[in-house]
Every structure is written in structure tokens, then in C-alpha cells.
Amino acid sequence: MCIVTVSTVMNEWRTKLGGRVAIVGSGQAAWAWGMGLMHAGIHITQVWGRHAGRGRALANRLDAEYQSIANITPVSWEGDVLLLAVADQAVEKVAAQFECGIFQHIVHCCGTLAMEALAVHPRHGLLWPLMNLSQAHENLLQGVPVLLEANNEPLREILEAWCLDLQAHPLPSTLTQRTSLHLAAVMTANFNNLLLHWGHRTLKGHGEHRLLLPILQQQLRLFAEDPTDPFARQSGPAHRGDIETMNKHLALLEYDPEGQALYRSLSRLIAQLKSKPGHD
Ligand SMILES: NC(=O)c1ccc[n+]([C@@H]2O[C@H](COP(=O)([O-])OP(=O)(O)OC[C@H]3O[C@@H](n4cnc5c(N)ncnc54)[C@H](OP(=O)(O)O)[C@@H]3O)[C@@H](O)[C@H]2O)c1
């Protein structure tokens, strides 16, 4: 009688569900996906890179084989899914450098590129996490929405299974939804970080920037709890039309012309938005 161990069953299940992954790239996204997938029990077979030092460092961390991408003509790779974690502009060109076997899939992880950028391969898709990946660690994608698309059902199941393994939230999406969310993420998270920089820069020497935390947390809590437009909660001197206070602030920013320009431009925008019907 044949005794089938639990681990054999798990391995077979994982193989069916895309449990062997090769990664192309060795930047922020490659580290974040590599660390997360490995931690979730997925086998990273290879890391393909054009910079041997960076590529080998990631391959060693993931217990994978390093392969050089330099000057290759279409080449085969090892695994179920080839994850392209390269610069957006390079996705199409790099995809064409690989051959896919009959059961192999290829995906990219860019927020603004159509899945069809990989159309040279018959089984393709993408997964884009709504998260800044600059600080790779094993649980970075836990709780994160991951927008995904696939042109075939088995790949869609693989990508959903990865997300569940990573304790992320898979969200089937379209290009229109994804690009809108990408734009919204840039305008809120990226631009907001620039404003956090200004808080830090303005307070320098006069207090710790974490004193601003309660007021920022209040904004985020209300953003999470209340679905109405946050502009309905706008406050501050520009919203009140308090010219005297604005002039005092601009005088305080005299040493920082960029800060003055930012202050003027945002205050003008707030006043304009407030004067529009429905915003008084
Ligand atoms: N970082 C994030 O927060 C984030 C979040 C969501 C999605 N993404 C997506 O993840 C993907 C990778 O971005 P990233 O942030 O990881 O960028 P990154 O840190 O700058 O790394 C880019 C990688 O692409 C490689 N590369 C660039 N041009 C190439 C080419 N022509 N041929 C081969 N390899 C090339 C680079 O190789 P070298 O090291 O040799 O230069 C590097 O390994 C992008 O599609 C991006 O939109 C990133």
C-alpha cells in the first residue's frame, strides 16, 4: 500500500497552484515579492538580473539560483510563473527575452501597464499591490489590497492563492480601475509624504515632528470611517479666509522659498475649492 505523506500532498497542491516562481529583477518589488512568497512557502527557483551583485544578493536570500539576463536570446526558465519585477519601461522588452513552456505563465507587477504588454506569451497576467515596497520584509504585503488580472483561469487561481498565502486581499480588476487607483495612490500617499517632509523640515529645531501624529491620525481615522469627501472636513486659515495668519506663516517661511510657493499654491487651491458651489 502506498503511504502518501501530508507534505507530499502539500507539495503537489502547491505545484498545481503555481508553487514554483522565477523572478526577474532585483529592485524593491523583486525583494518584496521574493521575501513574501518565500515566507508563504512558495519556492523561488531563480532570480534573473542584469546586475550580478544585486541579483546574487537576492538569490542568496531566497535560496534561489542566480541567472544573468545580459545578452540573452529567448531563453527557458524554471518554474510555473515568471514574475517580472523590472522597471515599467522594460517590461515588454524583458518579456520577449524569455520563452514560456506549455504550462508556464508570465506576470508583471506594474500599476499602469496593460496585461497585454505580455501578449507575446499565451498565458499572462499581472498583480499590483497598493503598497510602497521600499522596505522589503516577509510580511510587507499582509492586509494589502492586490489588484490582479489574468487571461486564463488557472493563472487567476494561482495569483489569488498567492495573495491568500501572503494574507493579502486579492481584487480582480480592470485596467481602468487599476490606473485610477494608481493615480489616487500617487495623489494621496506620494504627495502626502512630501507634505510630511515639509512638516519635518518646518519644525526642525523647534519640536519633534511626531507631535503632529495625533492630528494626522485623526484625519486617517475619519478617512477610514466616513465615506464622505474629506474636503467637507477641511479647516485652517485658507479655508477660513484668514489673511493675517497666512501672512504670518509666509513670513515664517521666508528662509524657504519652496515652502512659501507650496503654501501659497495649496492655500489658493483650498480657497478656490471652497468657493465652488456645494463647498461653503
Ligand atoms: N517599489 C514600489 O513601491 C512598487 C509598488 C508596486 C509596484 N511596483 C512595480 O514593480 C516593478 C519594479 O519596480 P521597483 O520599484 O522594484 O523598481 P527598482 O527598485 O528601480 O528595480 C527595477 C529593477 O528592474 C531592472 N531593470 C530595469 N531596466 C531593465 C532592463 N532594461 N532590463 C532588465 N532589467 C531591468 C533593474 O535592474 P538593475 O538593478 O540592473 O538596474 C532593477 O532590478 C515596476 O513595474 C513597478 O511599477 C513597485
Image: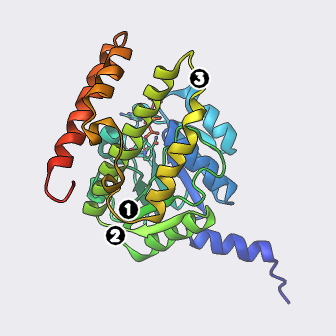
Specify which label sits upstream in the sequence, 1 or 3.
Answer: 1
Specify which label sits upstream in the sequence, 1 or 2.
Answer: 1
Q: What is the spatial separation of the Cα atoms under label 2 and label 3, in whole angstroms?
A: 53 Å
Picture residue at 53% right of the left edge, 18% below the top: 204
Is the residue 75 above or below the residue 265 in the image? below
Left-right relation of 142 to 41? left
Q: Position of residue 42 (x, y in %)?
A: 64, 59
Picture residue at 63% right of the left edge, 47% below the top: 35
- Reading the image, the residue beneath label 2 is 151
- Give the crowd class for mark 3: few <14, some 14-19, many >=20 residues within 10 Å: few
Q: Secondary structure at mark 1?
A: strand
Left-right relation of 63 to 71? right
- Give the crowd class for mark 2: few <14, some 14-19, many >=20 residues within 10 Å: some
Q: Nearer the viewer, residue 129 or 119?
A: 129
Residue type at tag 1: Gly
Q: Is there CB contact under 8 Å for labels 1 and 2?
A: yes
Q: Which mark is residue 125?
A: 1
Left-right relation of 8 to 135? right
- Reading the image, the residue beneath label 3 is 207
Q: Nearer the viewer, mark 1 or mark 3?
A: 3
Left-right relation of 101 to 45? left
Q: Position of residue 147 (x, y in %)?
A: 41, 62
Q: Secondary structure at mark 3?
A: loop
Which of the colour schemes (rainbow, by chain, secondary structure, one colour) is used?
rainbow
Residue type at tag 2: Asn
**Residue 100 visible in the snapshot:** no
Q: Nearer the viewer, residue 66 or 183?
A: 183
Q: Position of residue 126 (x, y in %)?
A: 39, 59
Q: Which mark is residue 58?
A: none
Quadrant of the rendering where the C terminus is positioned: bottom left
Q: Secondary structure at mark 2?
A: loop
